[in-house]
Each structure stands twice: as structure tokens, then as C-alpha cells.
Amino acid sequence: MTVTIYHNPACGTSRNTLAMIRNAGIEPTVVEYLSTPPDRQTLQAMIRDAGLTVREAIREKGTPYAELGLADPSMTDGQLLDAMLAHPLLINRPFVVTELGVRLCRPSELVLDILPAPQQGAFTKEDGEPVIDAQGRRIQ
């Protein structure tokens, strides 16, 4: 089973997502996308397969989004992708790719929908929110 996470270690949501993957007993391929961004074809496929628009996959907070004028509704998907590839910080995170699908895991629990293995035990997010109980079941 292959699981790939496009990860930013400085992001709590990304760290929580990675920890839930590992809590399922899976050691994923970790791509630190800020230093190793996906190519255009891979980025387009992840966005499409996650059921998102290009605009929905852009991160605004803490990025050059405003200064690049990306809020302009006349910007095409191609122009938005160009900006994301030139400035990987604009790629929202974390994207996770498994044999069961692709998700932009915001919130991090969305990864549970596409993991090919169950959780192996309790899991609590960094902020103290419990997500998985001791039996490996999701807490609603």
C-alpha cells in the first residue's frame, strides 16, 4: 500500500495528518513540497482527484496570494497553477494520495476516509482534541 503526503513540517494540520497515517501502521512517502514541489501534471491531478477547483487548492494565509493579485476572478486556472508552481507556499496542505483516493486533509481527519488500513490505537491532535479512541475508532 502506497501513501504519499505532501507535507509541511511547520504546519500543525500537516503534522497531525502524518501522525494519523503512521497511527494506521503506514510509513508514507513524505514529500516536503516547499523544497520539492510537485510538477504541473501531478498538481493538476491531485486537485482534480480531490474534487477541488484550482482556486480551492490555493492557500491565502501567510503567502504572496494578495501581492500577486490572485484574488482577481479573471485569473485562469493556468495562471493560478503557474503561481502555485512558482511559489509552492501557495499550495494548500496537506494533500494525501492513496490507492483509495486523494484528499486535501483540512481538517486532518479527512485522511481517515482514504487510508487503506485502520487506526491502530488512540490518537489525539496536537491541540488536545481526541480523534481516535483506544479501539482505533473515530470519535464523532
Image (tube, rainbow, N blue to C red):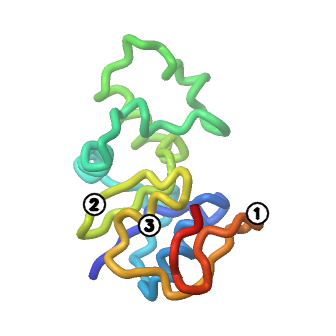
- Element under label 2? strand
Q: Indicate the position of residue 117 as horizontal and vertical percent values.
A: 36, 81
Residue at coordinates 67% horizontally, 39% vertically from top-left?
Answer: 62
Q: Is mark 1 on a helix, strand or loop?
A: loop
Camera-side residue of 44 and 127: 127
Residue count near mark 1 (Cα–Cα under 10 Å), binned few <14, some 14–19, many ≥20: few
Q: Are marks 3 and 1 in contact (CB under 8 Å)?
A: no
Q: Can you identify the residue that label 3 sits on?
A: 112
Q: Residue 127 carries which label?
A: 1
Q: Earlier in the sequence, mark 1 or mark 2?
A: 2
Q: Quadrant of residue 76?
A: top left
* Residue drawn at 53 percent across, 18 percent down: 69
Look at 68% across and 69% down and name the residue there.
130
Q: In percent of the image, x 41 and y 81: which residue is there?
A: 118
Q: Depth check: give the residue in front, 24 or 64.
A: 24
Tell me which label, 2 or 3, sits earlier in the chain: 2
First in residue order: circle 3 vs circle 1: 3
Residue hosting label 2: 101
Measure how far apart labels 1 and 2 are at the Cα level: 27 Å
Q: Which numbered marker is on residue 68? A: none
Above or below: residue 115 compared with residue 35: below
What SS does tag 3 mark?
helix
User: What amino acid is labelled 2 in the image?
Assistant: Gly
Q: Which residue lies furthest to the right in this view?
A: 128
Q: In this view, does 8 lie to the left or right of 76?
A: right
Up the image or down, 99 lies above or below 53; here it is below
Q: How crowded is mark 2: few (under 14 residues within 10 Å), some or many (20 or more)?
A: some
User: Which quadrant holds residue 15?
Assistant: bottom right
Q: Where is residue 140 in the image (x, y as percent from the top left)?
A: 57, 61
Return the x and y of residue 48 as percentages of the image width and height. Answer: 26, 43
Q: What residue type is labelled 3?
A: Leu
Which residue is nearer to you in this view: 60 or 26?
A: 26
